[in-house]
Image: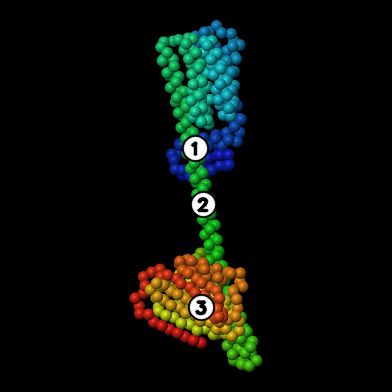
Amino acid sequence: MYEIQYVYEDGPVTQDVDQHPLTRHVQRLTQRARAFDGRRPLVWDLLVTGFFVVAAGIDYVGGGWRNIAPNTDLPGWLIAVLTLGMSLPLLSRRTRPMAVLAVMVGFGVVNSASGAMLQIALVQLIVLFNIALRLPLKTLGWAGVLMMAPLVVGTVRYPRGSWDQQIVPQVWAYTLVALLGIAVRSRQDHTRALVERARQLEVERDQQARLAAAAERTRIAREMHDIIGHNLSVITGLADGGKYAASKSPERAAQALDAIGSTSRQALAELRRLLDVLRDEAPETAELAPQPALTDLDRLIDGVRSAGLPVRSTFHGRADSLPQGQQLTVYRVVQEALTNTMKHAGAGATAAVDVSYAADGVSVSVTDNGQGGAPSDGGRGLTGMRERTALYAGTLEAGPRPHPEPGWQVRLHLPRASAPSTALPTSKESVQ
């Protein structure tokens, strides 16, 4: 396993690949060369151009060109001009390849027509490769036509054997170089597409992580709102009742204080369990406890009653087959509705909780006859109830009771998510 680093204009991209050690070494060298070329392209262009200028100069000074030239009586200055004219333009082969090719072809025509036949003319293949690598295919076709001019001039001016022996091998060389440029270009485009796809996947992964974190923060905030809001409302009610009873019935005041302590400890325990889950420690170090269920509704209602709010509760049917998540939703909706009643219904208000389990789901109704208006917590409680209801495709209605009845009502219905229970329905009603 090793890393390949692709260097583009917007930065390097690293990819892990399994390859043979020799291939790995070659890849590393290639990537280093590409990285250097990306940082300092002029240096590489000067090196390539300088190499061919020196090679052509050696051929000119040593007279090696006379070994294959049809005409060896050409003046030295012409050979020097042709040598520089077909090698120096390489410096701009990547930025202006068609202009470079046009210049080289012009000197190439003179080279073929004069009979010098300098081998430096073959560097046109490098320019052809860059055209295939960087420019549209139609431009590549025009480049091929342009390169045929020196070849045709040389064949007509100095024929050697049949025309196909002079032209066909050169055409094959042009074709192979063009195909090589197209192959390299296709490979680079494919690599860029893969890199872009990987970046998109990383962006999508980060977005999903942020959405999951936001959803988790919302869930935690909702749980803390339900826990703290309800228990503080109960404590407030108990404190007000204890203050009223302190002067007339010390025993009732003591009972209120005991209830305040019990409710506070319960709230702290629930908060501690919730916050333990948020720690960076291992999950097994957190204190574990089941979420509230419908079996805990009686204790919830008893706590509200002890805080001074008379509550009538009615239960129809059994919740044995109701999923735990739906039970928690019902519990939290009842808890929030009673909390709002305690906060806003006013003195002398009473509440009623009706829970009905049927084959098609569970229905809950929480009503009061108070004089208060809508909750003043910025809608967080109602929003939390609606979010919990939406998780199970349920319906929730919250608002004033129909005129002329005073008070507020909350109605919840959750469709059954599993098979209906075969247990016989039972009915339980308690009033206090």
Mark 3 or 2: the one toward you: 3
Label 3 crowd bin: few (<14), some (14–19), many (20+), radius 10 Å? many
Q: Nearer the viewer, residue 268 or 374?
A: 374
- Foreground mark, 3 or 1, reads 3
The answer, for residue 431, to whether it is visible in the render is yes
Q: Which residue is pictured at 59% across the width and 90% down the height?
A: 252
Q: Specify whether residue 55 is in view.
A: no
Residue 20: assigned label: none
Q: Residue furthest front?
A: 404
Q: In the image, residue 34 lies at what x, y percent?
A: 55, 35
Q: Are marks 3 and 1 in contact (CB under 8 Å)?
A: no
Nearest the viewer among 300 and 34 is 300
- Crowding around mark 1 (Cα neighbors within 10 Å: few <14, some 14 to 19, many 20+) is few
Is residue 155 shown left or right of residue 236? left
Name the outermost residue toward the right: 247
Q: Residues within 10 Å of mark 2 (few under 14, many from 20)?
A: few
| Residue shown at the point (57%, 76%) measured from the top left | 340
Mark number for residue 366? 3
Write down the residue under mark 2.
204
Name the residue located 63 percent from the left edge and 84 percent from the top edge: 240
Kindly identify which residue carries mark 1: 189
Relative image position of residue 215 (x, y in whole percent): 53, 62
Q: Quadrant of residue 162?
A: top left
Dots 3, 2 in contact, CB < 8 A: no
Give the CA separation, mark 3 to mark 2: 43 Å
The image quarter containing residue 306 is bottom right
